Amino acid sequence: MNRVFLSPPHMSGKEQQYIAEVFESNYIAPIGAFINKFEESIESYTRTPYALALSSATAGLHLALRVLGVGRDDYVLASSFTFIGSVSAILYQDAKPIFVDSDESWNISPQLLKKAIKEAPKKPKALIITHLYGQVCKLDEIIAICKEAGIYLIEDAAESLGSAYHGKQSGTFSDMAVYSFNGNKILTTSGGGMLISENKEWIDKAKFLSTQAKEDYLHYEHKEFGYNYRMSNVLAAIGVAQMEVLDERVERRREIFNLYQQYLCEVEEITFMPEIQDSRGNRWLTTLTFKRTNPMKIIEMLEKENIESRPLWKPMHLQPLFKDALVIEDGTSQRLFEQGICLPSGSSMSDDEVKRVSDCIKKYLHDFS
Ligand SMILES: *Cc1c(COP(=O)(O)O)cnc(C)c1O
C-alpha cells in the first residue's frame, strides 16, 4: 500500500515554469519580480495593503514583535495550544510569555484571556493568537478585549491561509499577522512566510530589519542590527504558482474533512474539531478526539498500515522549556492533547485514501472495544 502522508506538498504544475523564468532573468536572489508578484497576490487575496515575503512565519513573528517595540521583560500573551513557532520570537526578544488556555472552540478562550490580563504582573504589550488547524479564533471578543486593554493583537495565521470569519480573511483582523509556506502547510514554497499589515510604516520597518538593517547609503552603514530574513525570488516563484490554486486547495481540504465525518459518524466516541459560527476554516488538518481510546494506540496502528498521523500540538505550558512561564489554564488544551489526533489531510489525497484511513480506525475500535 502507498504511504499516506499527513500533509505533503501539492504542486499546481506551474511552479517549474515560473522557476524557469527566474533562471532566465538570473534573479536567483532575495530580490526580483516574483517576490513582488507573490506579495501582490497575498495583498489582493486577503485585501490587505502591505505584505512582506520572508524566509519563514517564525521570522515574521520575530519582526512583528520587534517592530511593535516588544523588548526585554515585556509580557506577551499567547495561545498555549499551538506550535512552538508561534512563540519562539517572544524568547528571541527576551520578553516573557503568558500562556492562555483554550475553550470549547479549541482556540484561545476569551474568558481566560481577560483573566490573564487582570492577573499579569504588568500590562502585557501584545497578544499572539493562533488560528489552530485552520479554524479562526473568536475574533470579535478577542479584538474587543485587546482594544479595551490597549494591547497589540498579532495573528499567527500560519495554518489558516484561506480561512475566513464573517467573510473576511484570517490574518486581516489584527495589527500584524503571518502566514507560513512551510512544507506541510496548505500551500508551500518549501519554506517561507509572509508578514502582513495595514500599517505601511511597520511593514517598511520590518523590510528594513529583514535585510540586515542597511541604512540608505552606498557604503554599508548601520545604526541598528537586523536579520537576514528575506525570501528568495526562486521560492517566491513557487509561491505565485501556489496562490493560483489556493481556493481549490481550501475546497479539497474541506471535502476531505467532510468525507472523514461521513465515514466516521457512526463512531460514538469520536468528536471532530468544531467550526465556530460565521466562520469558514480551511480545514488544514482534520483533527478529532477520542472519548476512551488512547490516540497513541491509533497512531501506532495507522503507522503499521503505512499511514502517517500525529498527536495534537502539545500545549506550550506543558513544555519543559516553559516550566517557569506564567499560564492561565483550566485543563482544556491538556485534555485535547491527551485525547486527540491529526489525520492525513493533504489536498492531493484521494477519496479512497480517506476511506482507507477511516476503515482502519473503525476496524481497530471495533476489535478493541
Ligand atoms: C508552521 C507554524 C509556524 C511556523 O511557520 P514557519 O514558516 O515554519 O516558521 C508557526 N505557527 C504555527 C501555528 C504553525 O503551524
Image (cartoon, rainbow, N blue to C red):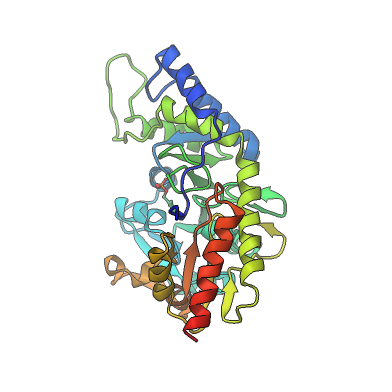
Residue 119 appears in the rendering = yes
Residue 320 pos. (x, y %)? 27, 69
Residue at 38% x, 57% y is: 87
Instruction: Reply above or below: 303 against 168.
Output: below
Of the pair 11 and 209, the residue shown nearer to us = 11
Of the pair 186 and 329, the residue shown nearer to us = 186
Residue 26 pos. (x, y %)? 40, 14
Instruction: Reply above or below: 201 against 255.
Output: above
Residue 252 pos. (x, y %)? 63, 50
- How many circles with numbers are drawn on the protein? 0
Residue at 49% x, 82% y is: 367
Relative to 197, 28 lies left or right: left
Residue at 51% x, 52% y is: 159
Instruction: Reply above or below: 217 against 166.
Output: above
Residue lying furthest bottom in this view?
369
Relative to 132, 311 lies left or right: left
| Quarter of the image where the N terminus is located | bottom left
Residue lying furthest front in this view?
1
Give residue 31's quadrant in the image. Answer: top left
Residue 62 pos. (x, y %)? 38, 46
Residue 144 appears in the rendering = no
